[in-house]
Image (cartoon, rainbow, N blue to C red):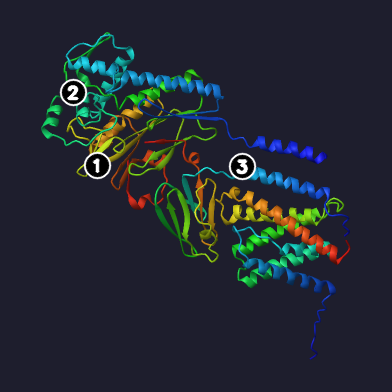
């Protein structure tokens, strides 16, 4: 009997996705041990990778990197399918959706910093919606909106700026 | 993708709108009025409303274990919680209207309400 | 540059938006010897202010006219009675009040008896603050035997006399309710459609609080906060008699201001009685008066008394027991869900 061997040939893009995801996962894990002033307020540094992947390669790459990061991080931390995982996923999905539309904005006027801010606001929106609609329906999330928004703006700007610098250094800027 | 210079009009627009929203959010949602009642929610339903002007401890047994809520001298906190992260306990005491503490794993949340929300007038 | 202008305008717009709901005009006052809380919804500030003032003025007038122990028309009347003299030129209002009070006394089998002022004074409740007294059994017996009653008043024209000089009228269980009815009238005169008036705990509701009914809390007779809440529909009133506001404790026994006319002693055992009254001409007065006979009644007599007085919604709180009518149970919501563990809840018919 002849053995059939199925050879999967990783493409260069696969390698790149894997590398980027690995970095993103690493950043996520580092972030998970950092103390945060308030639950839900995080720098979200792994988002730099997502944004970078989108600019450097394409949107599909960014989706892969983002989703892989969310799943892998939660598996590693033993939080798979936990509320934390759900929140992360909800935030990331809405964030990706926002990026999909905002990348269409003219790059003459909008840099990674702007997009990063938009995506971080989308991230907190996704999380707050999940809390309100499903996790704790009674929660008066209004109290959290001011501080989450401020964090979204600040960290969005920082991450966006870092992404911009990385792109400039590596590439076509 | 080519970028020409650092700051763009579009970015500034986004930043400014965000700032306005943040200021608005703080003004609207953050009250510094001392609350008088705490509403305890458990497993998706309101467990009860309790005056902050009493000394009281209540225990709720949820999925993860026992959460202990303590009311003392106009403030309330999670005294103990079975969750791993202990975020809810770490936040400490709350007492302003609108402040809330949530323990997602054990499905318990406590929110400080203002006087007026509860009833319009007291019969005694 | 254009952006800064745009954002300036936007900022201003945002700040203006943060103004809160101005439709509720609420004020608290100390009038009529007690705390008065008036809420008026959906009127402009001037109208609300004027109406509030009118109501407060009326309350002050009633306070001066009907006070039980400070100089008033009522104390003058009592004075005349004690001296076996006729009281002349009584106001039509006072005569009307006394006639109504008398019919309440009769209907309640004399459990509501405003003529026992001498007993109330003996127990020390004709003061703003009271000290514990050691009850003298024989003295109380003597006072009880005098059997004062509003039935002993003789009214002809505007002259009031009494055949029993020991009649001393105390309208404590009537005046607040009556004041509510007067306030109700003033609200209508000012065309106010939505208001909530609270005199010393007695509340009447007119209209609603915006798009939801007025909501009232019910005091825990042994706690500092509300124990229950219910919606008070348009025209309804609520009143509570309790042993926790005017009382003193002596040798571990609580003596409250609600004196049983037959025994001469304060009613004991009951913490509070709350009645809810459907809309009527004198809904306020009813909400004040009708809680008293239930407070004084023996447990087994309560349903009969409630039926006689046409009370459909009542709530009685005692030591570890809460009883109420089914209709009351339907309307009320207890705030502490563990209430059932601490109290035996009884629903009577």
What label does residue C148 carry, if any? 2
In this view, the residue in front, A96 or B30, is B30
Q: Quadrant of the N terminus of chain C?
A: top right
Q: In the rendered structure, the residue with mark 2 lies on which chain?
A: C
Position of A11 relative to C3 (above/below)? below
Q: Is residue C108 left or right of residue B68?
A: left
Q: CA distance from mark 1 to mark 3?
A: 49 Å
In this view, the residue in front, B37 or C11, is C11
Q: CA distance from mark 2 to mark 3?
A: 61 Å
Q: Residue lying at the far left in this picture: please name it.
A: C138
Q: In the rendered structure, the residue with mark 1 lies on which chain?
A: C
Residue appearing at x 35%, y 44% in the figure: C223
Do tag 1 and tag 2 residues touch (Cβ < 8 Å)?
Answer: no
Point out the frontmost of discs 2 and 3.
3
Q: Position of residue C174 (x, y in %)?
A: 31, 25
Residue appearing at x 14%, y 31% in the figure: C140
Q: Quadrant of the C terminus of chain C?
A: top left
Q: Is residue A57 visible?
A: no
Residue appearing at x 55%, y 44% in the figure: B32
Secondary element at tag 2 = loop
Secondary element at tag 3 = helix
Q: Is residue C146 left or right of residue C76?
A: left
Label 2: how many Cα within 10 Å (few below 14, some 14–19, many 20+) = many
- Mark 1 — residue? C269
Point out the frontmost of discs 1 and 3.
3
- Mark 3 — residue? B28
Position of C90 relative to A44 (above/below)? above
């Amino acid at each position: 009997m002849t053995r059939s061997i199925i050879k999967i040939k990783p493409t260069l893009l696969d390698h790149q996705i894997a590398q980027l995801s690995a970095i993103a996962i690493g950043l996520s894990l580092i972030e998970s041990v950092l103390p945060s002033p308030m639950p839900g307020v995080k720098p979200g540094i792994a988002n730099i990778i997502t944004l970078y992947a989108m600019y450097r390669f394409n949107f599909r790459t960014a989706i892969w990197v983002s989703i892989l990061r969310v799943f892998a991080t939660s598996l590693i931390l033993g939080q798979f399918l936990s509320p934390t995982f759900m929140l992360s996923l909800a935030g990331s999905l809405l964030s990706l959706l926002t990026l999909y539309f905002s990348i269409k904005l003219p790059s003459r006027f909008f840099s990674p910093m702007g997009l990063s801010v938009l995506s971080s606001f989308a991230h907190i929106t996704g999380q707050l919606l999940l809390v309100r609609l499903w996790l704790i329906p009674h929660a008066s999330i209004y109290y959290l909106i001011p501080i989450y928004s401020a964090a979204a703006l600040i960290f969005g700007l920082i991450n966006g700026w870092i992404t911009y610098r990385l792109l400039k250094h590596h590439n076509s800027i | 993708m080519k970028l020409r210079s650092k700051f763009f009009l579009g970015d500034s627009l986004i930043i400014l709108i965000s700032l306005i929203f943040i200021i608005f959010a703080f003004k609207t949602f953050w009250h510094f009025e001392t609350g008088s009642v705490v509403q305890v929610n458990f497993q998706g339903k309101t467990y009860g409303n309790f005056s902050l002007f009493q000394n009281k401890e209540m225990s709720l047994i949820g999925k993860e274990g026992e959460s202990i809520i303590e009311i003392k001298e106009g403030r309330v906190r999670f005294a103990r919680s079975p969750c791993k992260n202990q975020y809810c306990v770490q936040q400490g005491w709350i007492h302003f209207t609108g402040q809330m503490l949530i323990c997602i794993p054990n499905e318990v949340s406590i929110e400080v309400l203002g006087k007026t929300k509860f009833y319009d007038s007291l019969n005694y | 540059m254009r952006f800064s202008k745009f954002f300036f305008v936007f900022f201003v717009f945002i700040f203006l938006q943060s103004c809160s709901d101005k439709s509720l005009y609420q004020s608290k006052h100390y009038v009529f010897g007690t705390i008065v809380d008036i809420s008026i919804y959906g009127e402009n500030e001037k109208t609300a202010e004027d109406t509030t003032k009118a109501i407060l003025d009326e309350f002050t007038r009633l306070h001066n006219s009907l006070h039980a122990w400070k100089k008033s028309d009522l104390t003058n009347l009592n004075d005349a009675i004690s001296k076996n003299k006729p009281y002349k030129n009584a106001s039509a209002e006072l005569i009307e009040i006394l006639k109504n009070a008398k019919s309440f006394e009769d209907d309640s089998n004399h459990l509501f008896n405003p003529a026992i002022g001498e007993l109330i004074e003996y127990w020390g409740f004709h003061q703003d603050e009271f000290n514990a007294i050691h009850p003298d059994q024989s003295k109380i017996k003597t006072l009880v035997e005098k059997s004062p009653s509003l039935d002993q008043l003789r009214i002809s024209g505007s002259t009031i006399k009494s055949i029993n000089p020991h009649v001393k009228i105390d309208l404590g269980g009537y005046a607040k309710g009556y004041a509510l009815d007067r306030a109700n009238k003033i609200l209508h005169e000012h065309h106010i459609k939505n208001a909530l008036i609270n005199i010393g705990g007695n509340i009447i509701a007119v209209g609603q609080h915006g798009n939801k009914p007025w909501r009232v809390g019910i005091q825990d007779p042994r706690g500092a906060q509300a124990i229950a809440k219910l919606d008070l529909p348009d025209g309804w009133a609520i009143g509570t008699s309790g042993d926790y506001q005017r009382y003193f404790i002596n040798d571990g026994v609580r003596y409250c201001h609600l004196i049983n006319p037959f025994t001469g002693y304060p009613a004991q055992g009951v913490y509070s009685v709350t009645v809810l009254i459907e809309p009527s001409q004198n809904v306020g007065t009813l909400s004040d008066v009708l809680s008293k006979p239930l407070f004084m009644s023996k447990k087994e007599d309560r349903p009969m008394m409630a039926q006689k007085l046409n009370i459909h919604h009542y709530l009685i709180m005692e030591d570890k027991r809460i009883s109420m009518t089914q209709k009351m149970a339907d309307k009320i919501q207890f705030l502490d869900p563990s209430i059932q563990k601490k109290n035996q809840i009884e629903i009577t018919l």
